[in-house]
Image (cartoon, rainbow, N blue to C red):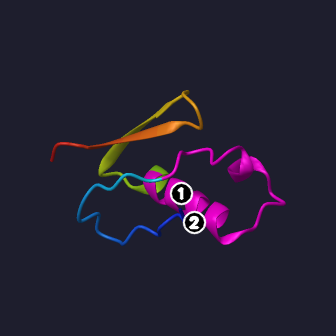
Amino acid sequence: MAARRTPSGWPGCRPGPGGCFFGRVADPAATDPDTCAVRDLNKLLRDDDRVGLSLLVMTDGITLVRKKSA
């Protein structure tokens, strides 16, 4: 299953690939579209002040995203 790019504005919550993507996210030589999409999603989540993040160290990593209260 190919990773999906997340639209701006965060209209909903959708399940997606793990935050580490089989270790490829940390490998600068990995430039395939799926790995780049996971990197982009991780950066988007990291830089969004509206959400809090946790990465569970399970299988390939499970990213939990929680909307912060206003």
- Name the one closer to the observer, 34 or 42: 34
Q: Secondary structure at mark 2?
A: helix
Q: Is residue 16 left or right of residue 40?
A: left
Within 10 Å of the Cα at label 1, are there few (<14), some (14-19), or many (20+) other Cα atoms?
few
Distance (Cα) linking label 2 and label 1: 10 Å
Q: Amino acid at mark 1?
A: Lys
Q: Amino acid at mark 2?
A: Ala
Q: Secondary structure at mark 1?
A: helix
Q: Is residue 9 left or right of residue 43?
A: left
Q: Position of residue 49 (x, y in %)?
A: 35, 51
Residue corresponding to mark 1:
43
Q: Position of residue 10 (x, y in %)?
A: 29, 63
Q: Position of residue 62 (x, y in %)?
A: 48, 37
Looking at the image, is 69 positioned above or below residue 57?
A: below
Q: Is residue 36 left or right of residue 28?
A: left
The image quadrant of residue 54 is: top left
Image point (29%, 68%), residue name: 9
Residue corresponding to mark 2:
37
Image point (69%, 52%), residue name: 25
Within 10 Å of the Cα at label 2, are there few (<14), some (14-19), or many (20+) other Cα atoms?
some
Question: Magenta stretch?
Answer: 17-45
Q: Position of residue 56 (x, y in %)?
A: 49, 29
Image point (58%, 32%), residue name: 59
Q: Is residue 51 left or right of residue 43?
A: left
- Name the one closer to the observer, 42 or 22: 22
Image point (24%, 43%), residue name: 68
Q: Earlier in the sequence, mark 2 or mark 1?
A: 2
Farthest residue toward the left? 70
The image quadrant of residue 34 is: bottom right
Which marked residue is nearer to the observer: mark 2 or mark 1? 2
Looking at the image, is 11 positioned above or below residue 19?
A: below
